[in-house]
Amino acid sequence: MNFNKVLYLFLMTGCIFAGCQSDSDSETKQKQQEAAEHAFRSTSVEFTDQWAQAAQKDGNSAVYLQIYNGTATADTLVAVHSAVAGEAALHESFQEKGLTGMRPADRLVISPKSMLALQPGGLHIMLMNTKQRLAEGDSIQVVIELARTGKKEVTVPVRLAN
């Protein structure tokens, strides 16, 4: 089989898989896009695309979201809290010298009119020693504390990690 045929088959397979996306996936992505667009028009601090990984009781979970600072002043993420965990902390995933791991993250400054993304493989909120099972479809409350804005409670849906 020559290179052009292999390339054609590869591209067609990608198109087929893209076309197999379910309506609920499309609706979810559309809602996420609408929320992000609203955040970018905002003049306040907004939270979008939040979700938490499912976890067993006494286990660990991670929370991911985007924080948009629509104000004219920088703000700093200083702490996180959640009643569903024995401890909540801001962490970052890293790869150094062939090692992969997680470590606590310092306070994070969010510049004016900018977005801070907490996402798998990077910055995230770590929930340790969960006090209950976090099942797909549940929602939890997470308090995000910013130096200027103060404490904001965010409702976070639980889902299975991709």
Image (cartoon, rainbow, N blue to C red):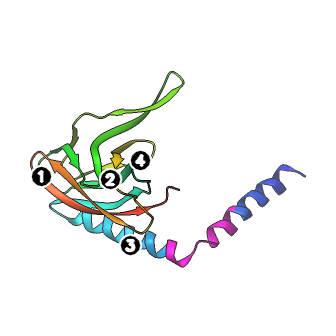
Q: Are marks 4 and 2 in contact (CB under 8 Å)?
A: no
Q: Is residue 25 left or right of residue 93?
A: right
Dot 2 falls on a residue whose secondary structure is loop
Lower position in the chain sequence, tag 3 or tag 1? 3
Q: Is residue 128 left or right of residue 6?
A: left
Alpha-carbon span between mark 3 and mark 4: 30 Å
Numbered disc in front, either 3 or 1: 3
The one nearer the camera, 120 or 158, is 158
Lower position in the chain sequence, tag 1 or tag 2? 1
Disc 4: CA contacts within 10 A as few (<14), some (14-19) or many (>=20): some
Alpha-carbon span between mark 1 and mark 4: 39 Å
Q: Which portion, as a residue range, is magenta?
A: 14-25
Disc 2: CA contacts within 10 A as few (<14), some (14-19) or many (>=20): some
Magenta-colored segment: predominant secondary structure = helix
* Among the 4 quarters of the image, the one containing residue 43: bottom left
Alpha-carbon span between mark 1 and mark 2: 39 Å
Disc 1: CA contacts within 10 A as few (<14), some (14-19) or many (>=20): few
Q: Farthest residue in the bottom direction?
A: 23
Alpha-carbon span between mark 3 and mark 1: 26 Å
Say which residue label 4 marks: 59
Q: Residue at x 15, y 60 (%)?
A: 44
Instruction: Report if residue 42 is visible in the image.
Output: yes
Q: Residue at x 30, y 50 (%)?
A: 85
Say which residue label 2 marks: 131
Which of the numbered marks, if any, corresponds to residue 72?
1
Disc 3: CA contacts within 10 A as few (<14), some (14-19) or many (>=20): few
Lower position in the chain sequence, tag 2 or tag 3? 3
* Among the 4 quarters of the image, the one containing residue 103: top left
Which of the numbered marks, if any, corresponds to residue 98?
none
Instruction: Report if residue 71 is visible in the image.
Output: no
